[in-house]
Image (tube, rainbow, N blue to C red):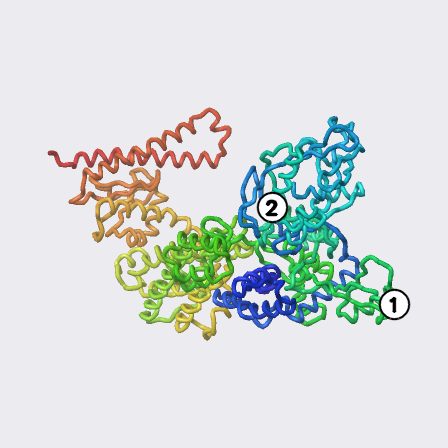
């Protein structure tokens, strides 16, 4: 429960970029103003105002979904207490050298005008030429092509042809690199090229990093706009020229003809200029990987920036070791390999974000106003500006009055503050009672897409700042997608509000929500068309319990969940089934003259009571094992199967005549003379099966189970009724050990098949209300089983009597040899050991029945031939395991018996068929 609280309430902490992006769109749409039209304070006031209006929607949804959380502990990462913890964490990590400031290439989103982390970059594979929409451009931009152009050699005849997918960066080229072993370029090692637009000389360097097979084998080096080129610049001491600015336009370094031009517009201008200078050498399609901002959809631009970084190598090793040592268990376990691979190759984490919404970095640039020396940037940090000023005075040997501090305007990556959540929300850095009691947590449950965004960050920061792993287990659930398997996105119009599923919503209201959102007009049209296609009549009212049960019915450890409303509706029908069952049960309890017995003292008397009790024991045991493995879909499947297929379809149908004192003769003959005692036991068994099943269903369907459980309380035996089902202990199999009858469970599988075949025969005869006599010709062991469950076969097959017959000579009681099946009867094959016979009724359409038998024979013959072919193959005995051969033999015997029966039945029917 505690882990669920943390993961659920964290939703309000991971909204740094999202909050600001939504707010900027909202202000632009409503007021026609951009963020830059406000001061930082004015903009933050607008964000807080919007947050206070809309921020509690997630809480409202959680309450409606029945989340039983400790709402008094609701925590938002921008709350004052939590903000103090963020500042404390930053200062401590800076003091220990874990956080440092450096110049490096960062993943820059020009649309957001901010750096983002590696894990917020999506890689889009492009197989060839393609046109894509890019934020800030009216027309689509071409990608998936490679341009080749030439640099003239300086003081030497010839040229160096280079290939690139990003010609707009060539204004920032500082060198041309070739592989030292490439025979084509041995003569130009150490020479220079002349840049056609800037007139700079570019050295030709050699490096084994160059791929001789890619393009021309010679590559342009742009250290300020490419991660690989940045490494080359470090090894070869090359300068770094930034030619694309933070807003995605070309910088003054490019010259007046390009300054201020958007980067992808500049691309075509540069290609045209190369053509004009006769340096263009062609363009071809090229498969590539495009880095895209997961937040804005923008194409990532690597930019050279001074930022704050977290050194991750050492703390990443501790996170790996925690899993290897068993301190931290990752479920499902296949994520363990992913965990190790990512953390083993982790780079330092850039935590600076050029946003206004978030925790402003508690670091300060130190300015010496009285100094004339030009110094490198000097930074200090502190829990407050006063503390930072004291630190600066000591660090640089000046008085506090001789310096000016300017706080870094950037904010921290939202995942930095989120990574502190397990302990900061409990009052850290103070040693609060909550921190001592609840930290470390037992389990974190979250989406599998957050393994690096959040979980790895929590483990690394928790270990570093508290010395403890923040939780002992991590359970990754699957992602909920739409019914087509697509990720839910507002631009696709496939985001489903749980409240719309719970209460129902019209198509008109869904469309209105899109119009009220922050989508641009083009995205609105796409979203509304998707809604019309998926929800032509809106979403019907399904209720909370149906939605919860539907979500938990999917396998949560593995593939993503493709949720369709039809699945939720199916669960709503299950809720109706539960209501109807309770209605019947209450009727039985109200008519009963004796009170319900205690569960631990209830001993089932007849075979059917034993069977349903044993099925219930097995169901509870299956739920226990599945809960321990966090396989909720197995629990829901077991509970649904028991309630519908065992309790409703079988036991209640069987017990109806018993409880209503009908079919009294059958009860007396087959089970006991004490029919009153039988009714009392059946009533008690029914009560406990229903009541305890409601308790089992409670975590998945808290509302309907509470309502119906309360209605059962007046009949509860023994102790006084509890105020709520939530206060009841969850059922366990040890309470039901005396209800375990494995022989009855096994035998009834055969009985159910007998009932199925019997019903099929009745349908073939067109019998809807009549109850004919039936004969079962079977082996002695099966005869004993049918005799044991005789009343169940009568009741559920709707026959007037059941005659059990064993062939002469079989080892069976004489009573099983007395009555042969009638010659003129329809025959149904249960398996190779048992046949059912139903006397041919007057009015039977013989011709139609003969036609059905011919069709059935035509289907069975190929199946039998296929099995015979496999069985008779030369390597069958050598290659096929014994248990598989046994299954094949049984299946073959059944098919042969059924075909033989069909032939016999055809002969009988053809003899009874009237002649024309």
CB within 8 Å, label 1 to label 2: no
Q: Nearer the viewer, residue 760 or 602?
A: 760
Q: Quadrant of the C terminus?
A: top left
Residue 699 pos. (x, y %): 49, 63
Residue 829 pos. (x, y %): 31, 40
What secondary structure is marked by label 1? loop
Q: Which residue is mark 2?
A: 265
Q: Nearer the viewer, residue 900 or 862?
A: 862
Characterize the local packing of mark 2: few (<14), some (14-19) or many (20 or more) Cα atoms within 10 angstroms.
some
Residue 753 pos. (x, y %): 35, 46
Q: Nearer the viewer, residue 710 or 157?
A: 157
- The Cα atoms of the two marked residues, 1 and 2, are separated by 50 Å
Q: Quadrant of the N terminus?
A: bottom right
Residue 326 vertical position relative to residue 678 in the rendered view, above or below: above
Relative horizontal placement of residue 399, taking residue 583 as reference (left or right): right
Whether residue 749 appears in this view of the structure is yes
Of mark 1 and mark 2, the one earlier in the sequence is 2
Residue 145 vertical position relative to residue 98 in the rendered view, above or below: above
């Amino acid at each position: 429960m505690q882990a669920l609280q943390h993961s659920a309430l964290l939703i309000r902490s991971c909204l740094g970029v999202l909050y600001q992006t939504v707010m900027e769109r909202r202000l632009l749409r409503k007021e026609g103003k951009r963020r830059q039209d406000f001061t930082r304070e004015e903009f933050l006031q607008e964000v807080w105002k919007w947050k206070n209006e809309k921020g509690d929607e997630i809480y409202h949804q959680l309450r409606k979904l029945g989340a039983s959380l400790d709402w008094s502990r609701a925590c938002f990462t921008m709350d004052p207490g939590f903000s103090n913890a963020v500042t404390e964490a930053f200062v401590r990590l800076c003091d220990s050298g874990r956080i440092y400031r450096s110049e490096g290439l960062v993943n820059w989103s020009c649309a957001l005008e901010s750096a983002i982390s590696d894990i917020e970059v999506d890689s889009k594979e492009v197989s060839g030429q393609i046109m894509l929409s890019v934020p800030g451009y009216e027309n689509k931009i071409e990608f998936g092509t490679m341009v080749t152009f030439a640099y003239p050699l300086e003081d030497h005849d010839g040229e160096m042809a280079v290939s690139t997918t990003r010609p707009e960066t060539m204004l920032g080229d500082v060198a041309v690199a070739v592989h030292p072993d490439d025979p084509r370029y041995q003569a130009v090692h150490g020479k220079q090229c002349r840049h056609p637009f800037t007139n700079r000389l570019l050295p030709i360097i050699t490096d084994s990093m160059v791929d001789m097979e890619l393009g021309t084998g010679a590559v342009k080096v742009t250290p300020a706009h490419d991660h690989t080129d940045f490494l080359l610049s470090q090894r070869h001491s090359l300068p770094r020229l930034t030619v694309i600015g933070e807003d995605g336009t070309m910088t003054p370094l490019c010259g007046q003809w390009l300054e201020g031009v958007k980067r992808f517009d500049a691309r075509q201008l540069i290609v045209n200029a190369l053509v004009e200078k006769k340096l263009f050498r062609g363009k071809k399609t090229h498969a590539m990987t495009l880095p895209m901002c997961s937040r804005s959809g923008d194409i990532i631009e690597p930019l050279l920036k001074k930022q704050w970084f977290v050194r991750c190598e050492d703390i990443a090793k501790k996170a790996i070791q925690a899993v290897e040592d068993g301190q931290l268990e990752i479920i499902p376990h296949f994520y363990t390999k992913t965990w190790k691979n990512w953390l083993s190759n982790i780079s330092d984490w850039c935590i600076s974000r050029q946003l206004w919404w978030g925790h402003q970095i508690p670091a300060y640039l130190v300015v010496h106003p009285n100094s004339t020396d030009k110094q490198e940037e000097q930074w200090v940090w502190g829990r407050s500006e006063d503390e930072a000023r004291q630190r600066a005075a000591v660090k640089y040997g000046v008085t506090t009055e001789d310096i000016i501090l300017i706080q870094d305007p950037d904010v921290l990556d939202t995942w930095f503050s989120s990574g502190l959540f397990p302990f900061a929300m409990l009052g850290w850095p103070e040693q609060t009672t909550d921190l001592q009691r609840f930290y470390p947590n037992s389990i974190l449950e979250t989406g599998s897409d957050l393994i690096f965004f959040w979980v790895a960050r929590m483990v690394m920061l928790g270990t570093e700042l508290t010395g403890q792993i923040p939780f002992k287990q991590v359970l990754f659930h699957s992602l909920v997608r739409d019914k087509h398997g697509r990720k839910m996105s507002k631009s696709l119009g496939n985001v489903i509000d749980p409240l719309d599923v719970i209460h129902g919503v019209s198509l008109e209201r869904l469309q209105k929500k899109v119009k009220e959102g922050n989508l641009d007009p083009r995205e609105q049209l796409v979203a509304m068309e998707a809604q019309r296609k998926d929800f032509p009549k809106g979403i019907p009212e399904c209720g909370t319990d149906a939605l919860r049960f539907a979500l938990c019915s999917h396998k949560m450890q593995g593939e993503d969940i493709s949720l369709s409303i039809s699945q939720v509706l199916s669960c709503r029908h299950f809720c109706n089934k539960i209501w109807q069952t309770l209605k019947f049960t209450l009727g039985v309890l109200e008519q009963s003259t004796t009170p319900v017995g205690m569960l631990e003292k209830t001993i089932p008397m007849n075979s059917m009571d034993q069977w349903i009790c044993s099925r219930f024991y097995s169901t509870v045991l299956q739920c226990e094992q599945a809960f321990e493995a966090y396989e909720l879909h197995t629990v829901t499947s077991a509970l649904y199967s028991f309630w519908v297929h065992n309790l409703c379809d079988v036991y209640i149908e069987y017990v109806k005549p018993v409880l209503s004192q009908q079919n009294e003769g059958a009860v007396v003959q087959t089970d006991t003379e004490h029919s009153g005692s039988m009714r009392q036991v059946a009533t008690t068994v029914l009560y406990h099966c229903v009541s305890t099943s409601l308790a089992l269903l409670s975590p998945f369907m808290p509302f309907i189970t509470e309502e119906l459980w309360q209605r059962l309380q007046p009949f509860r035996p023994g102790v006084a009724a509890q105020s709520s089902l939530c206060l009841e202990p969850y059922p366990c199999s040890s309470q039901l050990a005396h209800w375990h009858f494995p022989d009855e469970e096994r035998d009834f599988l055969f009985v159910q098949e007998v009932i199925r075949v019997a019903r099929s025969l009745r349908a073939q005869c067109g019998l809807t209300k009549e109850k004919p006599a039936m004969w079962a010709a079977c082996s002695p062991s099966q005869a004993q089983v049918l005799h044991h469950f005789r009343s169940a076969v009568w009741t559920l097959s709707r026959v007037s009597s059941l005659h059990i017959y064993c062939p002469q000579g079989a080892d069976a009681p004489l009573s099983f040899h007395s009555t042969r099946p009638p010659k003129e009867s329809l025959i149904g094959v249960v398996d190779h050991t048992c046949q059912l016979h139903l006397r041919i009724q007057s009015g039977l359409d013989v011709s139609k029945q003969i036609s059905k038998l011919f069709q059935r024979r035509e289907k069975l013959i190929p199946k039998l031939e296929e099995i015979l072919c496999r069985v008779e193959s030369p390597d069958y005995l050598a290659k096929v395991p014994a248990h598989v051969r046994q299954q094949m033999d049984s299946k073959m015997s059944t098919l042969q018996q059924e075909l033989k029966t069909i032939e016999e039945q055809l002969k009988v029917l053809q003899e009874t068929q009237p002649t024309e």
